[in-house]
Image (cartoon, helix red, strand yellow):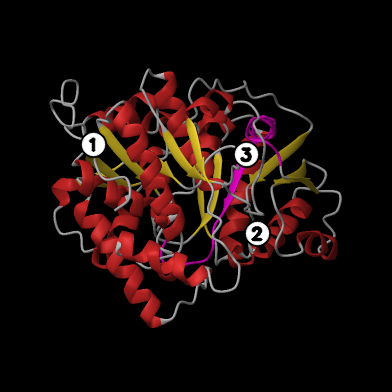
Amino acid sequence: MFAAAFAPACFSEGLVNSKLALAMKESGWDLEVISMVSDKATCYQSGWLPPWLPLKPILHQVETRIAKERGWRFPNLALDVLATGHLVKGVHWSRLAYRKAIELQTVKPFDLVISRSTSCCSHLPAILFKKATGVQWVANWNDPPPYLFPPPYTHAMPKCRRLMVRRYLRAAARMADYNTFPNRHLFLHLRIELGITDEKRLRIIPHIAFVGHKAIPWKRCDSLRLCHAGNLSAARRPETFLRAFKRVAERYKGRVKMTFDIIGTEEVNLRTITHDLGLDENVCFHGTKSFLDTLDLIARADVAVLIEAPCDKGIFLPSKIIDYAQTGRPILSISPKTGVMRDLLAELGGGIHADNLSQPDIEVALERIAQLWLKNRLDKLDPNRWVQEASVEAVLSAFKSMMPPSFATRRPVGIPNMNP
């Protein structure tokens, strides 16, 4: 598995990739992971903590430093580009990751290669490895490349660089034996850019559930507790939800106290916003927590809240949704009027959708939750079907279906070139 984002530095994609690797390992798969040494500032945890400790022996972290002395950086970069055929961010790591994979290949040949985004650079060593060995390759696309994030996200990229990245991404999608996406909306968003025309090589595979996790039984307390886990960036405009929350909390004052726990990083001065709204007694900031501590805090809430950016159409399947479902807590999705979350909640149940551009719509959703809580009927919003769709058995079965028929006996012949 090529996964630039991986434990022990865990942010959203690192968590997704680590959960998949852990499920494979616990299910008896013989797995090796090649990742990047990350200094990402938005990591939710760093350092080896449970439950990721079993992954430490199978992880190969590749250092990405390039000599910065005057006159040396450009020749190194030029050599990487000539060797890989692509000028993209992460090209130096990609070349070193490929060499590490070839080193492992000569000891025990692989049956399957998986490249995981984000970051998109994870596909480049897989391109090189596929060319050298012919091993079956599954490319995963969990997010668009940065320049294709829909508004209000802004990731400007010069046209010339965009053309180079597009050439690389199309090469990856074309060479991979299978391309996987967490939902069909994202596939349709990327289909033209990636040049995918053959849907026989397409698989829709949701983010995997955390192996072995057991939901904590819900326990009713004196207040109605809502919880959001993860980054609340400026693009997600959480103030709209907070204004709706304030109005409903005031409306139900005397009948139920409503509280809102926020776990994760703050990028939009949320403390000032909540103070200005007079919500200091209702909103609690917990900061960043480890994965297991986050699950525990979500499980202590009554409802798990998702706040998405007001895009024209929802194309993302946020990884936290599967964590929410595994705790057994109903989901309140503050998401685009059309798109992934609205469709999946309509299909699978387990929660309530509200248009994230409409404060009145959010208030209606919050009132419905308050009424169900007062009647002790929140169990009507059972997210169990989400857990079934994302179960370890279901996801690993999808990967097994992409194995070559003779994978148990096939072994590539010869030793490929370690330095293309």
Q: Amino acid at mark 2?
A: Phe
Q: Which residue is mark 3?
A: 303
Q: Amino acid at mark 1?
A: Ile
Neighbours of disc 2 within 10 Å: few (<14), some (14-19), many (20+): many
Q: Where does label 1 land, which residue?
A: 415
* Rendering coords of residue 355 (x, y %): 51, 60
From mark 3 to mark 1, how far is it between C-alphas? 54 Å
Q: Is residue 42 above or below residue 226?
A: below
Query: Can you say which quadrant of the picture contains the N terminus?
Result: top left
Regarding mark 2 in the picture, which secondary structure is present there? helix
Vertically, is 228 above or below 143?
above
Q: Which region shows up in magenta?
A: 289-314
Query: In the shown orientation, is residue 124 left or right of residue 255?
Result: left
Q: Give how far across and how far down residue 18 sits, in percent.
A: 49, 35
Q: Quadrant of residue 320?
A: top right
- Residue named by callout 2: 241
